[in-house]
Image (cartoon, rainbow, N blue to C red):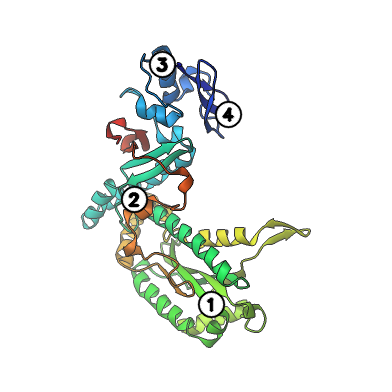
């Protein structure tokens, strides 16, 4: 059995053998392992160097990559090895989970929302990964499902985006000459205490709009999401993001101009002002005849914008004052059990309903990812609140 020798250079990490057969493990874009002075060296690298001088006599077989190594020869208890240090693509977890921690703390200050705080404390506390030469693949995690939990909102949004990419491919095949519009419908800001009433009115108005002859003539299907942002003066700004699948005839004889969209929205809203409406065709971008941005890219970007989040975490977290916390408590009361995503026409079943989404759905965002299928062994990372990081916790490995 050859000795294992970790080999680190500026861009890549290898595990080598004494016969010099280097095995590629991971490319590092940000040169995380490229430290040379001991002080800034990541804990993982220090641990790895220790392994050098203490290679066990009976090296377990089939160690082909860094993750396999971590599974078979875990670092000592005193070594903090963070998820972000060994998997670039998973470093986003620290940031998302920290937001959940902050929002959970705000709920914790108010007895009315204590159960949300408790559920959020237990959200995504452990992440169990399958592993292989491709890296890590999330296989199991626990989610709290509190509506405004940033982690749960982020996972749900990823799931819906994945759903939409699939739907888009199917639509392309079924309606090859149809096109897409991206529509934003707004209304004047309202007091946060009137948000529920305002959203109900907007939704009723939307249902009138989709029955209008003008709409039906041009539109084949739609998905609509609700976003609420916080105005500087503490008001709420609810608006709809809509992706419309339009028939080829829309751009010929059934075209609706920007002003007509505003008037249509005004007439169903029954308001005495012209509401701000933005409508744009989703299309490729060309520069001097050369395509710099394809239709597919444009659709993807519209999907991202439509399905990002309903309330941005920064608005939930606020500035730490009592007034900003109260704004968020009221938002929570006002949005209780409201549906923020809906669809119709040819896109009716494109997105999974909120109450049908399982923990597994939130784990397996890319179900078609067969290439990186793994065995049953799991590397487990747990969230450590004081440092806001996920750390490798081999005692929970499976
Ligand atoms: Zn959660």
Q: Distance between the residues labelled 3 and 2?
A: 40 Å
Mark identifier at residue 334: none
Dot 3: element: helix
User: Foreground: 360 or 338?
Assistant: 360
Tell whether circle 4 marks a residue whose Cβ is less than 8 angstroms from ligand 1. no
Residue at the bottom extreme, as displayed: 213
Residue 375, above or below 192? above
> Mark 2: few, some, or many residues within 10 Å (few <14, many ≥20)?
many
N-terminal of the two: label 4 or label 1?
A: 4
N-terminal of the two: label 1 or label 2?
A: 2
Question: Do the residues under discs 4 and 3 have CB atoms within 8 angstroms?
Answer: no
Q: Mark 3 points at which residue?
A: 50
Name the front one of labels 4 and 2.
Answer: 4
Which quadrant of the figure contains the C terminus?
A: top left
Dot 2: element: helix
Task: Using the rendered image of the protein, determine whether residue 271 is visible from the camera's viewpoint.
Answer: no
Question: Do the residues under discs 4 and 2 have CB atoms within 8 angstroms?
Answer: no
N-terminal of the two: label 3 or label 2?
A: 3
Q: How far apart are marks 4 and 2 (CA)?
A: 37 Å
Q: How far apart are marks 4 and 3 (CA)?
A: 21 Å
User: Foreground: 21 or 211?
Assistant: 21
> Mark 4: few, some, or many residues within 10 Å (few <14, many ≥20)?
some
Q: Mark 2 points at which residue?
A: 103
Q: Mark 4 points at which residue?
A: 11
Mark identifier at residue 220: 1
């Amino acid at each position: 059995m050859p000795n294992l020798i970790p080999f680190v250079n500026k861009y890549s990490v290898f595990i080598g053998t004494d016969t010099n057969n280097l095995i590629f493990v991971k490319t590092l874009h940000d040169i995380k392992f490229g430290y040379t002075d001991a002080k800034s060296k990541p804990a993982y690298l220090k641990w790895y160097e220790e392994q050098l001088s203490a290679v066990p006599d009976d090296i377990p077989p089939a160690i082909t990559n860094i993750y396999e190594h971590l599974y078979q020869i875990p670092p000592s208890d005193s070594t903090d090895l963070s998820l972000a240090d060994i998997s670039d693509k998973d470093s986003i977890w620290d940031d998302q989970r920290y937001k959940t921690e902050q929002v959970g703390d705000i709920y914790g200050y108010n007895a009315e929302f204590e159960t949300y705080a408790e559920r959020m404390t237990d959200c995504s506390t452990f992440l169990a990964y399958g592993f292989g030469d491709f890296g890590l693949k999330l296989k199991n995690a626990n989610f709290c499902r509190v509506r405004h939990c940033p982690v749960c909102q982020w996972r749900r949004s990823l799931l819906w985006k994945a759903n939409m990419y699939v739907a888009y491919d199917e639509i392309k095949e079924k309606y090859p000459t149809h096109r897409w519009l991206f529509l934003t419908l707004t209304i004047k800001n309202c007091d946060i205490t009137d948000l529920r009433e305002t959203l109900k009115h907007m939704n009723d108005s939307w249902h009138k709009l989709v029955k209008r002859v003008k709409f039906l003539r041009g539109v084949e299907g739609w998905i609509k999401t609700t976003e609420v942002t916080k105005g500087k003066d503490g008001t709420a700004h609810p608006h709809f993001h809509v992706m419309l699948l339009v028939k080829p005839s829309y751009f010929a004889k059934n075209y609706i101009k920007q002003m007509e969209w505003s008037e249509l929205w005004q007439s169903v809203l029954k308001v005495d002002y012209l509401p701000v409406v933005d409508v744009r065709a989703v299309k490729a971008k060309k520069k001097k005849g050369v395509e710099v941005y394809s239709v597919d890219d444009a659709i993807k970007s519209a999907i991202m914008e439509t399905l990002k989040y309903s309330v941005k975490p920064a608005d939930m977290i606020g500035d730490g004052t009592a007034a900003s916390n109260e704004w968020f408590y009221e938002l929570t009361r006002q949005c209780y059990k409201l549906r923020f995503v809906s669809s119709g026409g040819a896109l009716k079943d494109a997105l999974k309903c909120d109450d049908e989404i399982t923990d597994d759905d939130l784990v397996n965002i890319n179900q078609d990812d067969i290439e990186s299928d793994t065995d049953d062994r799991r590397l487990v990372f747990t969230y450590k609140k004081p440092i806001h990081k996920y750390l490798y916790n081999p005692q929970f490995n499976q």
